[in-house]
Image (tube, grey):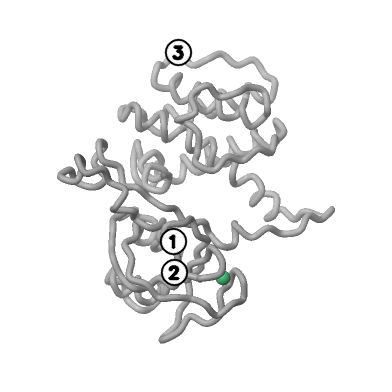
Amino acid sequence: MINPKISRQVEYRSFKDNPGECPGCGGSDLVNEYQTYSVATRKGKKISDSFVISGDFGWFCASCPTIVINKDEVGKMLGYGKSNWNIGSEFTVLGIADLDAIPANKRDLPIGDPNNPLPLIEFTEFSKAKKTPKSDVISKDDHEEQNLDVLQNIEFAIVSAYRRNRDLTDHNVDMALETLVKLYRGRKAFPPQNLLTLEVYEAAQGMCDWRLGETVLEDESDLPADLPLEQVSRDIIVACLNRLRKSVRTWTKQGGRQGYLNYIDQFLP
Ligand SMILES: [Zn+2]
């Protein structure tokens, strides 16, 4: 028996009949089951949507928390052509949509309505979930990988500000990040005058200080689901802030004045 309602690490594979061995434990207990999933898609760089689909493209390991997704099957369901679409840049299966968890009094509301958020049992990416042994030599890639959780924390603070106030623009975010870079470099930095910029500045600053170990967050509801505990240095915070600024520029170019905000709004829980 498998329990589909636990958080699993996900691997995408191309196969015909059987997925083969479990990438998590090497066992051969992968059980095919019909389930309902939340899937986010984009075509090229353009965000399409996230939505709920049901299908039998998931194989659940009976021995460990792993799921193997038949990416060809999902691709077919999404109507992608066979050639050159690639997982991650084209679609991501975010997790199991736990429709049973929707309270009875909300079942008449559309799923995803602000008053009826989709209960999601999230998957984690396999490569990121795997722990690599610590070594004295850390490559640049490993380094960036390690900071991924910090990036996500800050993005989470930014998207929370956006969800509280939809007037926020990418420009506000960029101004806030620019000021925070100055602050964490130890330069003179004044809190932004613009109230929208100030809101995202304060949210992101709270998250940065928390990762620096300099503060305790008061509002637990603003915390990301899976809490990292490792403290980081100011250099790492500054590197992450600069990387986010680059991301803001990229997505503004793609999607206009709220291109970045809409992008992270799609992909963060
Ligand atoms: Zn397994």
Marks 1 and 2: in contact by CB < 8 Å? yes
Q: Residue at x 78, y 55 (%)?
A: 134
Q: Viewer-proximal residue, 241 or 228?
A: 228
Tell me residue 70's x, y (percent).
42, 75
Name the image quarter holding the N terminus. bottom left
Of the residues shown, which amino acid type is indicated by label 3?
Gln
Marks 3 and 2 sit apart, C-alpha to C-alpha, by 43 Å
Q: Residue at x 33, y 70 (%)?
A: 34
- Point out which mark residue 193 bears: 3
Q: Residue at x 44, y 61 (%)?
A: 89
Q: Quadrant of residue 226?
A: top right
Q: Is residue 216 above or below residue 122?
A: above
Q: Is residue 199 left or right of residue 210?
A: left
- Point out which mark residue 89 bears: 1
Task: Give the SS element for disc 2.
Answer: loop
Tell me residue 138's x, y (percent).
77, 53
Return the residue found at the far left.
Answer: 108
Q: Nearer the viewer, mark 1 or mark 3?
A: 1
Of the residues shown, which amino acid type is indicated by label 1?
Ser
Q: Earlier in the sequence, mark 1 or mark 3?
A: 1
Image quarter for ligand 1 equals bottom right
Residue holding disc 2: 86
Q: Quadrant of residue 90?
A: bottom left
Return the residue found at the far front.
Answer: 1
Within 10 Å of the Cα at label 3, are there few (<14), some (14-19), or many (20+) other Cα atoms?
few
Name the image quarter holding the C terminus. top left
Marks 2 and 1 sit apart, C-alpha to C-alpha, by 6 Å
Q: Is residue 39 left or right of residue 150?
A: left
Q: Residue at x 39, y 45 (%)?
A: 263
Task: Give the SS element for disc 1.
Answer: loop
Return the residue found at the far bottom.
Answer: 17
Residue 41 in view here: no
